[in-house]
């Protein structure tokens, strides 16, 4: 594993994560969420104004929709995937793309592990792109939400990642050095 772990300075600032320090196979620090409670689901439902009863009314979820229990909101799991990428990139990187699929239901009481692993590196002229395989698995080891992400990171001796982010053009991607 490369030395791509973030460090905090004496002022509490997070050190940048540089593209130069990332290697294929590096694992992102896991995030553990849960056990998920009805309070978690209700607060999230309230925050995003999703009032579907499958997230807070057990009788409705089980008897009307035939579900095993209250469901963890898909948008909450989506947020967990974005969180792991954003936290890993630090404020110096830019989570460019995050994609995912819902393949299994996670229910109230579940503990969720959010994970990621670097699968590819794309060296561009202004910054580097890190390709990441990520997902969510529950306490039974079931992968419920697999996905991928692309994160832009600055080079150690290069300029910051542009803000607002300027994605690479197809021509830049065609000229890039790719490592998988």
Image (spheres, grey):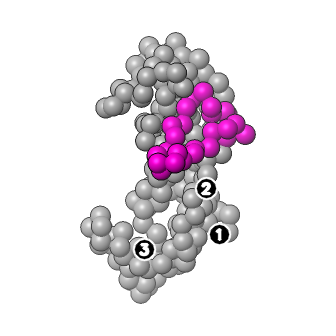
The x, y position of residue 104, in whole percent, is 55, 62
Answer left or right for 146 relative to 168. right
Towards the viewer: 165 or 2 = 2
Binning the other alpha carbons within 10 Å of mark 1 as few (below 14), some (14 to 19) or many (20 upward) gives some
Q: Which residue is mark 3?
A: 40
Q: Residue at x 30, y 67 (%)?
A: 47
Q: Is residue 152 above or below residue 61?
A: above
Q: Is residue 14 magenta?
A: yes
The x, y position of residue 164, in whole percent, is 31, 32
Q: Which residues are magenta?
A: 1-26
Q: Which residue is mark 1?
A: 139
Badge 1 or badge 3: first in the primary sequence: 3
Towards the viewer: 144 or 153 = 153
Is residue 69 visible to us here?
yes
Q: Residue at x 65, y 69 (%)?
A: 139
Answer left or right for 44 relative to 34. left
Q: Which mark is residue 30?
A: 2
């Amino acid at each position: 594993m490369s030395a791509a772990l973030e460090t905090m300075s004496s002022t509490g600032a997070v050190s940048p994560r540089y593209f130069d320090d990332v290697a294929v196979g590096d694992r992102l620090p896991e995030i553990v969420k849960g056990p998920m409670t009805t309070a978690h689901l209700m607060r999230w439902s309230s925050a995003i104004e999703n009032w579907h009863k499958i997230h807070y009314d057990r009788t409705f979820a089980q008897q009307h929709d035939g579900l095993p229990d209250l469901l963890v909101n898909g948008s909450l799991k989506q947020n967990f995937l974005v969180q792991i990428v954003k936290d890993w990139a630090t404020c110096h990187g830019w989570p460019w793309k995050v994609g995912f699929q819902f393949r299994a239901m996670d229910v109230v009481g579940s503990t969720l592990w959010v994970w990621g692993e670097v699968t590819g590196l794309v060296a561009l002229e202004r910054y580097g792109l890190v390709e990441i395989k990520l997902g969510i698995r529950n306490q039974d080891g079931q992968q419920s939400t697999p996905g991928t992400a692309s994160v832009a990171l600055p080079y150690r001796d290069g300029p910051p990642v542009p803000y607002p982010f300027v994605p690479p053009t197809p021509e830049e991607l065609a000229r890039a050095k790719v490592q998988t």
